[in-house]
Every structure is written in structure tokens, then in C-alpha cells.
Image: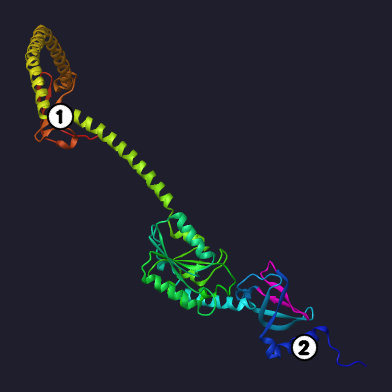
């Protein structure tokens, strides 16, 4: 009878627990060549490390990608920091990567990233510390190797763009032992020489060849330099620490010379163009000013005191002729109006009299309609007691004497009885 039978899940879990308890496997550095590298859409990175004797599967989850400062490619030699564990579903072990650096040059690159981060936190890359590059310079300081393509390119471009610019070359070591100290001495020497602008750089090379320009002492010398510095290290794709510290970065030494030195012929052409533009502008302004002057002269001729006095005299003479004519015309108009009024006055008076009589007749008729006598003529009478006009039964009492007014006189009567209806 079989005893102690385990499931696959239990065995895989047991093996995973063994890996977890192994301290060395929890934090291990593994060196090898990258193969089967795949960037998954989820952000995870899957690859294998191999050497001449074997292969091991690796994975870097998306949350750990901050530990990768470059893009992995097939065939790269890398060093992976991570842990070894078992993936229970497949029953196979793999490396869970946390950090990945390039082997050899990769160590220098990590050092480069670390120094770059430190100097950036110090504010040495801040744009407010960048000095402007002078547009027109007389002296250019160059810190580079005395031989090589870089210095030849700078000299040739300077002569082509502006032969009147003076080049001061400090022959510095640009790689190997003592290179960074030599570059620093060159920067300080040219600063004391009071050049207008400084180019610091060299031709292309590997990261080891360019390392002098990644040293902190060189970066500080560039940052503290009172003269504007243009960095020109390597080719366009090469980047060093002083590229971030310098006041301006040029992709190549040739480009640095073009940025530092203005084109003398282009400047002459610009001056010629501006001179012609200025002359055209002056001619236009003179033409406009001449037109304004002529207009103001004509205006002054009419507005001058003598001109105004002459105009007023002429106007006064015109008034002297017009006033008698106007007065005579006004008198004739008044006489004609008076004559017409005299002719129309009898007619107006007759019409007004007729209208007045008509209005009077209308008012008389209205008064007749309102007269008390007219009411008495119609059979009505007017009764007055001791207290005044009698209007109702309550105004009199038995025995009171009344006076009754009729059309042809008045009647005295005594109240014998009252009856209210």
C-alpha cells in the first residue's frame, strides 16, 4: 500500500518554500548574455540569461522597471540583481529581476546615472544658471586634445565663418589617467585669459574614452566658470555630464564652432540688407515729411494772422454791402405786412363781432334753461319757511308760516297739517 503521496501542487509549493528559505537565492547577482528578450504589452519584461554552459529564465515585472535604465536587446552582456524562485503553475524556477545593469561599460553607466542624479538635485542643471552665448565674439577658448579631428574641425569652421576670430587652444588630455584634472586646468586657464566663449570637448569614442567628461570635478569647473561654456563631446548620440552642466550643448565639435562663431559673410550680408532697408525707410519718411511740410505751409498760408485779417476785411466789406440791402428789404417786408393787416382788419373785426354775438346768444339760451323763473313759468313754485327753503316735510311743523313764490308774486300761508309719503 502506497503511503505519503503528494500532489503536484504540494511538491511545487515545497520546492518554492525551499528556494524562499535560501538566503543567497533571495538576493543574487547573475551575469550572462541576453536572449529571447520580449517586452510584453502589460509592461512585463521576459528574457533569458545564457552562457557557454546553460540558460536561465528571467522576468522583470512592470513595477520593477525603474531598475532598468536602458532598453535591453539580444546579445547584451548584463548583470541581473534579483531572486530565484519557483513558478508553481509550470513547476519551473526563474529569476525575478529587480535591477539590471550592463556588464563592464554598464557599471560606468550606473555611475554616470548616479552622479547625474546627485548634480541635478544640487541644481547644477537648472536653466536659470545658464549663461547666454555672446552673438559676436573675438576670442574663443578651446579645451581639447592638441591633435585629432575635433580641433581641426573647430579651426577650419572658425576660419571659414569668421577669419577675424582668435582661437586660444589649451592642449588637454581627454582620456586616460589625469584627463579630468587636465580638462579642469584648461577651463581655469582660459577663464583667466578672459576669452569670450569656451568650447570644451573631444571626438567620439566609447563610454570609457569619454569618461573624463563625466567626472564631478570637470562638471563643477564648468558650472563655476564665469565664461559661457559650450560642451562638444563625442558624436550626436553621445551624452556626458558636462552636456547637462554647460551653458549650451553642441552635438559635435563642428556644431560647437558654428554655434559659437557668427558667419562673417552672413553678417556682412545682413548689414547690407539692413542698410538698404534703412535707406528705403528714410526715403519713405522724407517723402512723407515733405508732403506734410507742403500741407502745413498751405495751411499756414490760410491760417496766418495776415491771411485771417485779409479774410476778415473782405468779410466786413461784404457785410457793409449786405446790411443796407437787408435793412431796405426788411422795411419793405414790414410795410407790405402792415398794408395787408390794414386791409384785413375790418374783415377780421366784423368776423369777430359776428362770432361774439353768436357765442352770446348761445350763453343766453343756456342761462334761460338754468333760470328759476323759467321753472316757475312751467307751473312750479318756491316755498320758503322761517329756517329757509322748504325741501321736505321735516323742515316745517304745524302752525308755521310759509311764503310761496309763484310766477306773478308770492303767497302767505300757515301750516295746518303735515303728511309724509
User: Does residue 408 lie above or below 149 as drawn?
Assistant: above
* Label 1 neighbour load within 10 Å: few <14, some 14-19, many 20+: some
Residue at 39% across / 68% down in the picture? 227
User: Does residue 389 lie above or below 214 as drawn?
Assistant: above
Count numbered badges in the picture.
2
Residue 243 magenta-highlighted: no
* Residue position marked by numbered label 2 in the rendering: 14
Quadrant where the image shows the C terminus: top left
Q: Is residue 336 visible?
A: yes
Q: CA distance from mark 1 to mark 2?
A: 116 Å
Q: Is residue 224 visible?
A: no
SS state under label 1: helix
**Residue 56 shows which numbered tag?**
none
- Which is more toward the observer, 52 or 61? 52
Stretch in magenta:
39-61
SS state under label 2: helix
Tag 1–tag 2 contact (CB < 8 Å) = no
Quadrant location of residue 75?
bottom right
Q: Earlier in the sequence, mark 1 or mark 2?
A: 2
Taking the image as shown, residue 248 lies to the left or right of residue 374, namely right
Residue at 13% across / 29% down in the picture? 304
Task: Please identify the residue farthest to the front as the structure is shown.
Answer: 147
Quadrant location of residue 90?
bottom right
Residue 119 placed where, x, y %?
47, 75
Residue at 46% across / 58% down in the picture? 158
* Residue position marked by numbered label 1 in the rendering: 303
- Which is more toward the observer, 164 or 404? 164
Amino acid at each position: 500500500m502506497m503511503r505519503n503521496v503528494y500532489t503536484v501542487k504540494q511538491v511545487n509549493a515545497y520546492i518554492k518554500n525551499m528556494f524562499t528559505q535560501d538566503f543567497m537565492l533571495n538576493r543574487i547577482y547573475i551575469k550572462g548574455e541576453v536572449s529571447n528578450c520580449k517586452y510584453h504589452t502589460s509592461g512585463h519584461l521576459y528574457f533569458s540569461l545564457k552562457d557557454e554552459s546553460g540558460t536561465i529564465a528571467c522576468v522583470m515585472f512592470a513595477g520593477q522597471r525603474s531598475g532598468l535604465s536602458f532598453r535591453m536587446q539580444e546579445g547584451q552582456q548584463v548583470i541581473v540583481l534579483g531572486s530565484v524562485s519557483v513558478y508553481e503553475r509550470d513547476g519551473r524556477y526563474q529569476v525575478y529581476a529587480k535591477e539590471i545593469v550592463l556588464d563592464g561599460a554598464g557599471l560606468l553607466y550606473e555611475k554616470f546615472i548616479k552622479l547625474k542624479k546627485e548634480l541635478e538635485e544640487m541644481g547644477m542643471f537648472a536653466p536659470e544658471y545658464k549663461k547666454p552665448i555672446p552673438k559676436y565674439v573675438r576670442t574663443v577658448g578651446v579645451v581639447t586634445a592638441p591633435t585629432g579631428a575635433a580641433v581641426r574641425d573647430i579651426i577650419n569652421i572658425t576660419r571659414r565663418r569668421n577669419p577675424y576670430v582668435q582661437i586660444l587652444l589649451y592642449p588637454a588630455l581627454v582620456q586616460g589617467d589625469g584627463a579630468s584634472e587636465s580638462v579642469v586646468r584648461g577651463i581655469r586657464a582660459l577663464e583667466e585669459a578672459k576669452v569670450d566663449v569656451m568650447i570644451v570637448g573631444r571626438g567620439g569614442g566609447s563610454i570609457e574614452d569619454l569618461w573624463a567628461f563625466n567626472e564631478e570635478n570637470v562638471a563643477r569647473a564648468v558650472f563655476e566658470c564665469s565664461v559661457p561654456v559650450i560642451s562638444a563631446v563625442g558624436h550626436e548620440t553621445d551624452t556626458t555630464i558636462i552636456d547637462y552642466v554647460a551653458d549650451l550643448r553642441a552635438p559635435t565639435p563642428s556644431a560647437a564652432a558654428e554655434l559659437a562663431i557668427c558667419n562673417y559673410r552672413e553678417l556682412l550680408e545682413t548689414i547690407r540688407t539692413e542698410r538698404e532697408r534703412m535707406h528705403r525707410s528714410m526715403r519713405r519718411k522724407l517723402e512723407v515729411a515733405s508732403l506734410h511740410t507742403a500741407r502745413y505751409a498751405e495751411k499756414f498760408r490760410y491760417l496766418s494772422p495776415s491771411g485771417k485779417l485779409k479774410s476778415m476785411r473782405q468779410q466786413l466789406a461784404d457785410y457793409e454791402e449786405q446790411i443796407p440791402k437787408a435793412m431796405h428789404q426788411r422795411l419793405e417786408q414790414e410795410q407790405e405786412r402792415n398794408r395787408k393787416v390794414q386791409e384785413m382788419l375790418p374783415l377780421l373785426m366784423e368776423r369777430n363781432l359776428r362770432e361774439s354775438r353768436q357765442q352770446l346768444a348761445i350763453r343766453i339760451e343756456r342761462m334761460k334753461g338754468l333760470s328759476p323763473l323759467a321753472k316757475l313759468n312751467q307751473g312750479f313754485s318756491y316755498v320758503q319757511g322761517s329756517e329757509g327753503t322748504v325741501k321736505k316735510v321735516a323742515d316745517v311743523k304745524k302752525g308755521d308760516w310759509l311764503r310761496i313764490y309763484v310766477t306773478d308774486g308770492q303767497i302767505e300761508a300757515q301750516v295746518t297739517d303735515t303728511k309724509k309719503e
